[in-house]
Image (spheres, rainbow, N blue to C red):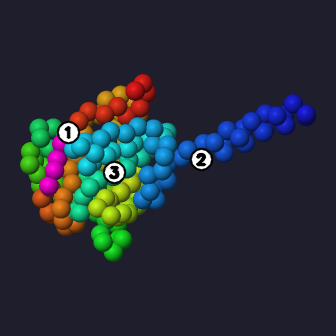
Amino acid sequence: MKAQKPIIGIFLLFCSLLAVHAVTEDGIISEGEYSRQASFDKDNFKLYWQVEGDKVFFAIDAAAPGWVAVGFDPGTVMSSCDMVFGIVKEDGSVQAIDAWSSGIFGPHPADVDQGGKNDILAFAGARRGNRVTFEFSRLLNTGDSHDKVLPAEGQLRIIWAYATNVSFTAKHARTGNATISLGGNK
């Protein structure tokens, strides 16, 4: 019986350490909260991410007076792209839109308006000065035909954008594309 006490103590310590490093969608990107990050547009758009089991957590920190967005595995330009838009208004209200781009240059209505479903599990956001923070989570495989299956490890092509207006239909001010490594070796 005495040999079990050290094992239980180690297990409890391990569990508490996991809880300290868990991602929380609270609109605040804490130091060490995400295992990976990339910066675009001279730090005007920063993307953070963390894969935990069958879920992926993303955070965007951007110099954006309007919406922010990230898209996964686009075809040509933004065709057939699974997208998530974050809108954080001046009054602090936050909206998340799970969208799908059907054409090279859009449109990209919400999944629910195209026969899909909203697969965002949780989200939060905040405005601080001229920056907006938006965090969200989703399953790697949502089972929705309007979402891409994201790999737990390996490369993922993304597109990113932000706007000067919080209206979901407002045109983006800046955009870009990149390939990120979701997990595994950096």
Of pointers 2 and 3, the one earlier in the residue sequence: 2
**Residue on which the image places disc 2:** 20
The three-letter amino acid code for the residue at tag 1 is Asn
Q: Is 152 or 41 nearer to us in this picture?
A: 41
Q: Up-down: is 91 above or below 48?
A: below
For the point 59% across and 47% down, which residue is it? 20
Task: Give the mark, 1 or 2, whose residue is nearer the N terminus.
Answer: 2
Q: Which mark is residue 65?
A: none
Label 3: element kind: strand
| Residue 4 visible in the displayed image | yes
Residue where numbered disc 3 is placed: 60
- Which residue is at a point 78% across and 39% down the rendered structure image? 9
The image quarter containing residue 154 is: top left
Q: Quadrant of the N terminus?
A: top right
5 sits to left or right of 28:
right
- Circle nearer the N terminus (3, 1): 3
> Which residue is farthest bottom?
91
Q: Is residue 6 magenta?
A: no
Disc count in the image? 3
Residue linked to disc 1 = 177
Q: Amino acid at mark 3?
A: Ile
In the picture, measured across the screen, residue 22 lies left or right of residue 39, that is right
Q: Are marks 2 and 3 in contact (CB under 8 Å)?
A: no
Task: Count residues near mark 2 (Cα–Cα under 10 Å), then give few for <14, some for 14-19, many for 20+.
Answer: few
For the record, the magenta segment spans: 173-177
